[in-house]
Image (spheres, grey):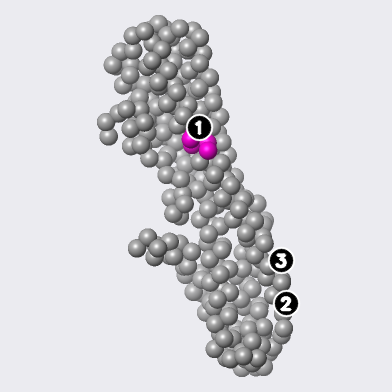
C-alpha cells in the first residue's frame, strides 16, 4: 500500500493527459507522413538537466529545514533543562508553565509552516508572541533566584532558537528559481507532443507499437520528475511523503510531559 501511495504522488492526471496528447500527435504524424529525426541529446540538455538541478536544489532546502528544526528542538530543550537544573528551587508550577510555553511555541510554528502563504501573517506574528512569552519567563525565573550568568545562558539559547526559526521561515517564503521552474515546465509539457514526428519515425523504422510506447514512456518519465520536484518544493505543506512533520506529541515527550 505504501508503494502504491508513493506512485500516486509521481504519476497523476498530468501524466495521463500529456501521454494521451503525445500519442494522439504521434498518430497524426503517422497518418499524414510527418517524420523527423530529432536529436535526443536535446532532451538531456534542455529538460533533464534543469529539472534534476531543481530537484537537487529543493532537496537541499529540505535538508536545511531539517537541520534548523533540530536546532530549534535542541535549544528549546536546552532552555527547559537549564532552567530546571540550574534553579536552586524549581517549583512544579514553574516547570509546568515553562513546558507549556515551549509546547505553545512549537504549536504556533506548526500552524505557521502549514498555512498558505497568503494567510501566514497572523500565524507568523503568533510565533514571535510565544518567543516573547518565553523571554519573559526567563526574566521571571531570574527574579525567582536564577543566577544572572545562567539567565544569560538561557537568553543565548533563546536567541539561537529564534535564528533557527527564521531559517525555517526563509525556506517557507522563498523557493528555487521560479524562472527555471517555469522554463522546465514549458519543455516538459510540450516535449512529448513536439517530438511526435520523431516517434512516428521510430514507428516506421521498427514497429508501430513502439512508436506509441515511446511517447507514453517519455511522458511518464518527464512528468514524474516534475511531480517529484513539485512535492519537494514546499517541505511543509504535508502533501508529499517527504514533507517535514512537526510532531507536537514528540515535543511533549522530549520535555517529559505525559502524552
| Depicted 61 relative to depicted 209: above or below | above
Query: Mark number for residue 71?
Result: 1
First along the sequence among labels 2 and 1: 2
Kindly indicate whether the residue at mark 1 contacts the one at mark 3 (C-beta within 8 angstroms). no
Mark 2 secondary-structure assignment: loop
Residue 68 in sight:
yes
Query: Mark number for residue 45?
Result: 3
Give residue 85's quadrant in the image.
top left
Residue 137 in sight:
no
| Depicted 8 relative to depicted 165: above or below | below
Residue beneath the point at 50% across and 16% down: 153
Mark pair 2, 3: CA separation: 11 Å
Mark 3 secondary-structure assignment: helix
* Residue 71 is one of the magenta-drawn residues: yes
| Label 2 sits on residue | 39
Q: Quadrant of the N terminus?
A: bottom left
x and y, in percent, of residue 49 in the image: 67, 62
Give residue 145's quadrant in the image.
top left
| Depicted 207 relative to depicted 87: above or below | below
First along the sequence among labels 3 and 1: 3
Q: Tell me the crowding category of disc 1: few under 14, some 14 to 19, or many 20 or more residues within 10 angstroms, Cα based.
A: some
Give residue 47's quadrant in the image.
bottom right
| Depicted 195 relative to depicted 69: above or below | below
Residue beneath the point at 50% across and 41% down: 66
* Residue 86 is one of the magenta-drawn residues: no
x and y, in percent, of residue 96 in the image: 31, 21
The stretch of residues the image draws in magenta is 67-72
First along the sequence among labels 2 and 3: 2
Amino acid at each position: 500500500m505504501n508503494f502504491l501511495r508513493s506512485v500516486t504522488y509521481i504519476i497523476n492526471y498530468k501524466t495521463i493527459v500529456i501521454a494521451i496528447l503525445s500519442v494522439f500527435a504521434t498518430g497524426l504524424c503517422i497518418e499524414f507522413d510527418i517524420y523527423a529525426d530529432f536529436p535526443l541529446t536535446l532532451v538531456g540538455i534542455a529538460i533533464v538537466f534543469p529539472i534534476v538541478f531543481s530537484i537537487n536544489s529543493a532537496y537541499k532546502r529540505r535538508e536545511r529545514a531539517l537541520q534548523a528544526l533540530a536546532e530549534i528542538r535542541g535549544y528549546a530543550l536546552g532552555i527547559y533543562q537549564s532552567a530546571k537544573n540550574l534553579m536552586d528551587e524549581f517549583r512544579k508550577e514553574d516547570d509546568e508553565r515553562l513546558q507549556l510555553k515551549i509546547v505553545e511555541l512549537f504549536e504556533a510554528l506548526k500552524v505557521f509552516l502549514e498555512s498558505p502563504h497568503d494567510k501566514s501573517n497572523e500565524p507568523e506574528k503568533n510565533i514571535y508572541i510565544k518567543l516573547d512569552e518565553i523571554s519573559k519567563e526567563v526574566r521571571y525565573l531570574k527574579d525567582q533566584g536564577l543566577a544572572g550568568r545562567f539567565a544569560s545562558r538561557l537568553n543565548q539559547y533563546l536567541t539561537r532558537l529564534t535564528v533557527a526559526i527564521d531559517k525555517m521561515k526563509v525556506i517557507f517564503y522563498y523557493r528555487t528559481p521560479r524562472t527555471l521552474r517555469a522554463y522546465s515546465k514549458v519543455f516538459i509539457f510540450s516535449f512529448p507532443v513536439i517530438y511526435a514526428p520523431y516517434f512516428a519515425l521510430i514507428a516506421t523504422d521498427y514497429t508501430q507499437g513502439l512508436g506509441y510506447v515511446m511517447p507514453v514512456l517519455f511522458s511518464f518519465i518527464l512528468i514524474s520528475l516534475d511531480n517529484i520536484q513539485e512535492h519537494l518544493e514546499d517541505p511543509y505543506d504535508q502533501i508529499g511523503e517527504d514533507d517535514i512533520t512537526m510532531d507536537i506529541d514528540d515535543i511533549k515527550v522530549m520535555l517529559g510531559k505525559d502524552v
